Amino acid sequence: MTFTDGSGSRLDDLLSREWLTTNHLGGYAASTIPSLNTRKYHGLLVAALAPPVHRMVLLSRVEEVVHCDGWPTPLACNEYPGTIHPDGHQSLHAFSPDPFPRWAYQGEGWTLGKTLQLLRGQNTVVLTYTLVGARRPIELELRPLLALRSIHDLMYQWNGCLEAEEKSAGHHRVPPTARTPEVFFAHDGVFANGEGVASWYFNTIYRLEQDRGYAGLEDLWCPGVIKWTLAPGETVHFVCSADPIELDRAVAATEVQAAQVDVPVVDSPLRDTDHDLLLRAAEKFLVDLPAEVIAKAPTCRVPMITKFPWSSPSVREALISLPGVLLVTGKTAIAKEMLLSLAARVRNGLIPTEFPEVGAEPVYGGADVSLWFINAVHHYLRYSGDEATAVRLFDTIVQILRAYQFGGSAGIVADPDGLLVCRSPGRGMTWMDAKAGDWVITPRAGRAVEINALWYNAIRIAAELAEHRVAPAQPNRCREMYELAARVQQSFNQRFWNVQTGCCCDVIDDHGSDPSIRPNQLLAISLPYPVLSPDRHVAVLERIRRDLLTPMGLRTLAPSDHGYQGRYAGDLVSRERACHNGSVHPWLLGAYVTAHVKVFGRSPKVRDDSRRLLKGCLMHLRADGLGNLPELFDGDSPHRPNGAIASATATGELLRCYVEDILDLSPWSTNTAAVAPSALAASLNVTVAPKVATKR
């Protein structure tokens, strides 16, 4: 994208667009187009020191100045109290985020290109500058500004007494202190760090942090200045790393990476630009941990960061994302490793909910996570045909189901009708788990609609595995599972259906029901085994279309509801209140598209209609999103992007439904019910999933 004027409104527009690139260790680089950091999470090198967590902002930003004919032109941009300084956005001519961030700056008689690459599998960033055109040589100065702190903290001058040591010509080390890690940098210029050069830059403002009600003022340390003289066509480099580095080797690695950017992310006969776009976006979330790292930290085995920039690995989001991020892209081996490692972490039927950023023991608590795990096993089997692994995981699946049915997990138990009841004071047990202090904003205690849709789906998956693959010689076990499924299905359709609204209630409690119109009921249609009676599917889709569907995804609550919050803005309490009470979550479009195709068939017209449902998100991904889909959008028009910059659930679910439902490319299902109806299931009056014509 090319820019032409330097007005203030142009700057605000540029600051609203954030780029992101990752190193597949959990680390990343991110900022706005003019590299003015508006969040404390922005930085040019955010390193995962205990991959994929314990992330620290090492190199916050750099300040570059071009000297031509004795005239200085700044390229950098920063905000201080009451001012923007320097004003390098005035010289910014063009920017592209793909295949890695690239900038073009122009001044009187010169054009300078800049690229940023993170080395895959390393906590190292390489900045490259090329004098594309000029009448005569120019001087380039670069000042690295270091933060040296956790992503959630801020740096202040008194946090450490810092200095840069010269290890060899062009190679430097900043030793660690009690509060800061060590960092290394290298270059092919001339370094000066005398008195008055190495210094603190005070009072950097992060405007989005202040808007969000957090502290947003930071001091950054500059170890010195690096200078080059560039002739037209000449290229120079600056490298920063959490580890000792060799400049030539780092530069050579960037050249190899750059040569590979045209290689498809996944081997596919498709030449579909939207498909390619989604594949590129999904690749950013993958974490490729080296064997030595796995040996040191075997407990954190979620192979993706599910939200950038601030979230630690979320197991719920990883399991929802798994079909799109791992299976559609052909990474079945990674999916297998993830499922087996999570199975080893089951406690009382619960799969961990998240692995904390500080590297502590995993957190348990989501009632839906174990059910998403069983759903992920089903999809893994569809794509891999790996029955041996399914057999290995079957005992874990049974363990989960029994714990849920008989109350082995805190606050989770099946009632006499077979429906799951979830109650745990002080925390949200569903994906709508927003909190402000001790206040659970959407507690949804009782029988939540999507929990019971997932519950039925999990029972059916286990029953089919038992009948056809794992325990065909144990008919009593199979019959028990099918009987439970039949009871759950009957109870669900009796108790959740709301005649007045023509859709499902959101939660059923012992004392009544919550008729709020939310998108959670979509899972009663979209999951492999839909619990909702087929004759009600059209009515639910129509209600969701009228009340919840937007160009960017589905609102989490109908605007007519008194609790609706249409803007995700303000302090923590305001944002958390809006998160699941009106904000649009694009990942739900995956379930909506799948349900739409299930209900109306797979004709070209239906699939074209489904493609149009994704148009808004795909346009955002291609334009203002700079290759990323955010966590959410405002519920009110114009549906501003909000939340995390990049979401694996949004990206993964759009990729999955795009490939499976729109392009009609899906593996032949290994689900026997989808190919040949089970006589046992039919004899127990369990609705059989309709056969879906799929191809590969």
Image: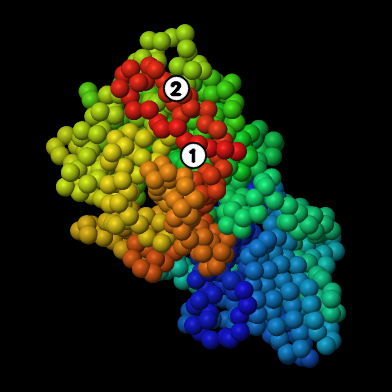
Give the mark toward the camera: 2 or 1: 2
Picture residue at 61% right of the left edge, 35% below the top: 332
For residue 525, above or below residue 421? below
Q: Amino acid at mark 1?
A: Leu
* Foreground of the two, 491 or 80: 491
Q: Quadrant of residue 326?
A: top right
* Observer able to see residue 498: yes
- For the residues bearing labels 2 and 1, Cβ distance under 8 angstroms: no
Residue pictured at 46% horizontal, 29% vertical = 674
- Residue 5 pos. (x, y %): 58, 86
What element does badge 2 sit on?
A: helix
How crowded is the residue under tag 2: few (<14 C-alpha within 10 Å), some, or many (20+)?
A: many
Q: Secondary structure at mark 1?
A: helix
The residue at 83%/88% (across/down) is 135
Residue 107 as seen in the image, left or right of residue 527: right
Q: Amino acid at mark 2?
A: Glu
On screen, residue 377 above or below 601: above
Residue at the location (82% across, 57% down)? Answer: 252
- Mark 2 to mark 1 CA distance (whole Å): 21 Å
Residue 596 vs residue 628, the one in the foreground: 596
Residue 370, given in percent of the width and then of the height, sits at 42, 32
Q: Which residue is mark 1?
A: 319
Q: Position of residue 283 (x, y in %)?
A: 61, 50
Task: Say above or below: 411 vs 265.
Answer: above
Q: Which residue is mark 2?
A: 464
Residue 496: x, y in percent?
Answer: 23, 38
